[in-house]
Amino acid sequence: MSALPAEVGSRSRTPLDSAALLDLLRAPDAGVTHSPLGPTPWLYLELDSLAALPVWYRKRLPQWARSRACPIIGAGAGAGNPLGAACDLVVADDAEAQVLMDNIERTPLAAMTLVQVLRATELLPIAQALMVESMGFATLQAGPEFQAWLGAHERVRSAGSAGPPPGPALRIERAGATLTITLARPQRRNALSVEMRDALIEALELVVSDPAIETAVIEGDGPDFCAGGDLAEFGTAPDPASAHAVRSTRLPAAALVACRHRVDFRLHGACIGAGAELAAFGRRVTADADTWFRLPELGFGLIPGAGGCVSLVRRIGRQRTTWLAISGERIDAATALAWGLVDSVNRAKGKR
C-alpha cells in the first residue's frame, strides 16, 4: 500500500490519483479530513486514473462519494467511470478547480449543505425536494457564515429598507385564455420581496384554480427580469425554524409547480437567484439576447432557496447546478440555451 501523500489533509491543490484515493478510502478519519470540520473542505479526484483501483473499490466509489460531507470535484473526462457521474462537478482543467476550491473555503458549511441537498433533491419528487431545500436553507440561516455576511452588509441592507415603492408589486392582465403576470418593481430590479412573493402566490393560485387559463406568462418591468431575493429583507425572519415554516406554506415555487405546465416565462436582463430558480420551473422559457443568469447565494453563506435546488437540477443537471452555485459565475443567454436552462432566445432585445 502506498503512503498517503503529505499534502492530503493540508489543502493539496492537485487531484488525488488512484493510489492516494485508495489510501483515503482505507483511512478511518477520511470523513472528517475532507469536511468543514477538517483542514480540506473539498475532495479533488483525478478521474482518468481511477480505473486502476481494484474492482471492489470501483463499485463502492459512487455510493461513497455521495455520502461525503464536502463537494467532490472530478478532473478529467472520466469516460465510462461511474464516479464521474457521482462527483458533484467535473472541471475541464486545474485552473477552474482552483477557483472552485477558493469559493468552497470561504463558506465551507454552505458548500457542504449545497451538495448534500442537491444529491437528495435529484432523487426526490418535487414537493419533497422543496422541503429538503428549505430545511437546508433554514439550517444555514442560523450558521456563522450567513451571520458574518449579514454583519458585513448591514449598511447596504439598511439603505434598501425604506419600504416598497408605491403601487402594486405585480400587474395582472387577462386576454381570453392568457394571463400575463408582470413583476412591477423596476426601481428595485424586481427583487423578490415578501410583498411580491405574496402577490405572486396569489396570482399563481388563480391559475391553479381556473382551468380556463390555458397560458400564464410571467415577465418583468424595467431593465431586468428579477435580481433575486430582496437583500433588505435578508435575516429579518424571527428564527430559522419559523422561516422554514413560512416557506412550507408560502413558497412561490410550490404554487408554480402546481400549474407549471401552463406557465411560460419571458426573461430579459438579470436573472439572479430567485429570478433564475423560479423560471426554471416554467413550461417554456424564452430569453432576450441580453439575458444573463447567476446564483450568488453561496457567497452569502446560503444555498439557492427559491426552488433552484429542485428546478435547476431538473433543467440542467446536478453538476451544472453545482457549478453555477459554487463558482458564482454568470452565464449568458447563449450558454443557457445550450444547457437547456432556456428553450429559445430572441436575438433582438425586447422593449421594456
Image (cartoon, rainbow, N blue to C red):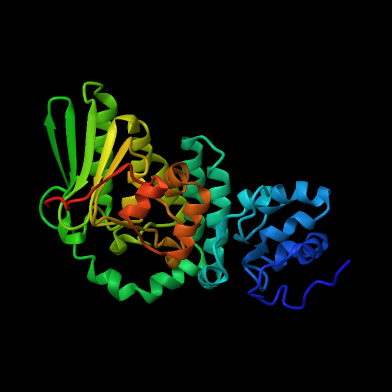
Residue at the image point whose x is 61% and y is 49% from the top: 85
Compared with 52, 300 (above or below) is below
Q: Is residue 352 left or right of residue 248?
A: left
Q: Is residue 201 left or right of residue 46?
A: left
Percent from the top left, x then y, of residue 21?
76, 63
Q: Using the image as rendered, state which of residue 289 and residue 302 is in the foreground.
A: 289
Residue that sits furthest to the right in the current view: 1
Percent from the top left, x then y, of residue 52?
79, 57
How many marks overall?
0
Residue at the image point whose x is 64% and y is 65% from the top: 44
Q: Is residue 78 left or right of residue 298?
A: right
Percent from the top left, x then y, of residue 203?
23, 36
Quarter of the N terminus within the rendering: bottom right
Q: Using the image as rendered, state which of residue 29 and residue 330 is in the foreground.
A: 330
Percent from the top left, x then y, of residue 207?
25, 30
Q: Using the image as rendered, state which of residue 49 and residue 192 is in the foreground.
A: 49
Compared with 44, 120 (above or below) is above
Residue 141 visible in the picture: no
Residue 158 visible in the picture: yes
Compared with 209, 204 (above or below) is below
Q: Is residue 160 left or right of residue 43?
A: left
Q: Using the image as rendered, state which of residue 237 and residue 219 is in the foreground.
A: 219
